Structures are given as C-alpha cells and as structure tokens.
Image (tube, helix red, strand yellow):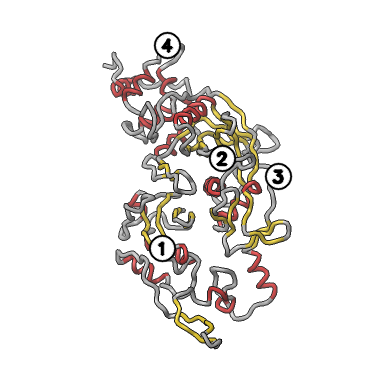
Amino acid sequence: MLLRIRSNVGIWRIENLDDRTATVADVMGAVQTTRPHVVFLEPLSFDPACKQHLASDRPLSEQGLTHGAMVHCRVDPETCLDISGATGSNAMQEAFANGTTPLATAPTATNMRRVIDKDGRIKLVPSNETPSEKERGFRKGMMPLRDMKMQWTLNDFMALDAQFEFKIQRQENAICKQVSVEVPSLTEFQGYLQTLQFKRKHMGFLYGTFFSDDPDEPTPNKVRVEAIYEPPQEFDPDSVEGVIPLDDPKEETVKRIAEMLGWRRVGWIFGQNDVRDEGHVLSSSEVIMAAEYQLEAADGVNETPFVTVKVAKGQDGNVSVEAFQVSQQCMAMVAEEALQVGPNSKCCVVNETFTAIQEGKPSPTVDNNFFLTVVPIVQHTSDKVICDFPRLNREVDTRHPSHDEMKKTLSKSGSAGWTFTDRLADFNLLIYLADFLDIKSDMPNIIASIMDKSVKLDDGYKLIIKSMAGIDGAY
C-alpha cells in the first residue's frame, strides 16, 4: 500500500504498508527511517487544515484510506533533515501507539559551540543550534560516514555518492506519442474555467485508454481521453499548488465504473490561473505533481503514456490547450524527494542532500523546461459516451448533479435519434447513479448495455431510473 503525506515542506511517499493492518504508528515509523527527528506541529490528518486527525488506534483501512490516498500534516521545516539529538523512531511509534502525538517541544541547550570572547580567546558556550554532527554528515541531512561503517574504500564512497547525484539530461521524446481528447468534455471543462475567468486553478482526471496503433510497437504509447472527472478540491491562493486535492469518497466508485467501461485514469488536466511569460510552461509545483501522478500510474519509475494537459489563457486573451509529460529522470528525482518547490516557480530547487549536475557543474536549481517533453494533441468526439450531465464537486456553477438534471438529460431520449441507453452513457451521470443503485449488481448490467448495443437494457432498470428522475410514464 502506498500512502502520500502532504506536509508544508512537500509530499512524502510511504510505500510497502500492509493495506489491512497498517496504523498511524507504522506510517510514523516509515517517516522516521528518513527523517528520524522530524517534529510535527500538526499530526496526520484527513484535511489540509489538519482539523480531522487520523485515529491512532485503528488500522488505516478502517479509516477509509486506500492505496495512493493522501493525508496531511504540518511539520517544523528545520527538523525534516536533522538526524541528530532528537527523539528516535521507537519513541515516536510508542507515542502514537499510546494515542499521543509527539508535537513540537522547547529546545534544550545541550549542544556547545565555539565563540570568540572580548579578549580574543576562543571558548565553548551552550547552544540550542543544530548539533555539529549535521555539519559532519556525509551529505546534509545524513549521518557521518563513520556512523555508517568504520572502514570505507574509494569505490564504496563513490558508489554511495553516486546515489545522490543526478546528471541533468533533457529527454528528447515523450513516451506518449499522441493524446486525443474528447471535444465535448474538453469544451465543457474549458467553459467552467471561463466561468471562473481563469482566476482560480481547477483540475480534473482524464479517463480513457492507453493504446498503440503500430503493429510493430505493441506497447501502448498513445492516449485516448473519453471523459473528465473533477475530484473534490479546495482553491488555495496561498499554497504553491493553487489548488489542494481533497479526499474523495467516490474515488473507488469512479475507478470501478471506469473499469466497467474499459477505461482507466490516463492523465490529468488543469486550468492555469495566471498569465505567464513565454517559455514559462509549468510551475515547479505542477512539474512535481505531474511526476507524482506519472509515478502512481507507472507504479514506480517506469515508462507510462500518462499525460498532463494544461488549459491556459495567454497574454493575448486566447485560450490554448497543451499536453506534456515529465521525463523519467524527473520521476526518479521526485521519487527520491530530490526536488522541491522554491521561490522561483520557473525552476525546481534541488534538495540539499542531493546534487544536480548541469553542464558539468553542480546547480542548486533545475529549470522546469529541462524536465518537460511535449505530447502532440488531437481531438475526437466519442461514439460511446456523451457529455451532458453536470459535473460533481464544482463550487461555482449554475448546474449541479440532481434528479432534476437527470430528468433533463434522460428526457431527450426518443428525439434526434437518441435512445434511453444513449442518454445514460454519460460518465458523470453513471457516477451519480451509483449512489442509488448497487455498484456490484446493477451498474455492470447497465454499463454492459451501453458498451454493447446488442445487449438490451432490462425494462426493470428503465422503470427504476425513470422513477428516480420523475419522468412521466415511469409507472
């Protein structure tokens, strides 16, 4: 099981958790392996505001957390890389097991530092500063070499050092050779951004298929987008991301309906909320988020056609739609937490534990464009599904999912060549229906008739759905 922790200093990935028995203590133990002295200002929580804390005495699965879930916390940034003079992982796990949270405590003056006295003499005085072991570490935030093992050869040292060094190279070609976006879905998403006047960032997930139309290249390298689902999210102009994804109670439902349709999550789309200079394609937070999604889709640093689609309003007022992937080197660096968001959104900051080599010299930052590869984008209109039902999870919209909206959508059957099954073939409508029909027994039968026109929709389902919508003649 993979769990993501969004803190005020970045996103941490906790892997290899037991999806049945893992608890908060297990998560904290995993955090301690890389950050043994992190101090939590707010404990692990369901919400970005850290008001809804995770229960320490219940397994994560019982709290609705599944593979890939996101939890939140706030930490003291100065303690995230410190490996000396703080509480160890065993004490941390015991604190959580006892139902308490090891939050920030006052520093103790147990360390010493050298100062020059008035008479010019050097003397030692108590200090609350970070212990000197940090300065003696193999790399910043790591233990000294002698604390790892007593004897080192040159080959040992070079092999260890190479693990923390990235020679930045541009990836010339994207893994994804083309993405085809469904026109009505894209138009509807873009229309909502126009409603927001491109003043708020908004995102959604792309659902469709990976495929290859080259018989000599059986590995899927193209994307066909059939629908867009917009998850719960919170606009936050003060955060580097601009929008914070929230826990989605419908995540499993969306996944299962997509699988019934023969789809999967193939990318993500977002509306840019600021006008940028030419050449400023993605911000550092967007690059890191794109890498996170590609890592999740590829289950590690592997090849995947998963794409990022950006909808932006240019300086001339025209709206553009572009598609990208981040390089596999970017994925590897994000997986190692070697990239961070800095004050300049045009470049990613390299974590001080790592070294990025550009043009033969170490560089503290990497230009975002080094990580980007362009994906050609085309359009199509789906012959399987429609895009008419209101989107879920929108704060500013004139239409919202409801039985009345379902009535408007389904009442068009029998006109303009539409059948009742044709009008049901709306991804967001099917997600809404799953709240009232059984996802295991009812939805597979309904979707089977949508995907295969030779499979007739049972009259019983028609009666139930029409009754829900309040369509005349349902009884």
Q: CA distance from mark 2 to mark 3?
A: 17 Å
Residue 3 in the image, given as x and y percentages of width and height: 44, 54
Can you see residue 1? no
The answer to whether mark 4 and mark 1 are in CB contact below 8 A is no
Are there few (<14), some (14-19), or many (20+) residues within 10 Å of tag 4?
Answer: few
* Residue at 66% from the left image edge and 48% from the top image edge: 370
Q: Nearer the viewer, mark 4 or mark 2?
A: 2
Residue 472 in the image, given as x and y percentages of width and height: 29, 14
* Residue at 40% from the left image edge and 58% from the top image edge: 74
Q: Amino acid at mark 2?
A: Thr
Q: CA distance from mark 4 to mark 3?
A: 50 Å
Q: Nearer the viewer, residue 466 or 327?
A: 327
Q: Is residue 216 above or below residue 407?
A: below
The answer to whether mark 2 and mark 1 are in CB contact below 8 A is no
Residue that label 2 marks: 308
Element on which disc 4 rests:
loop
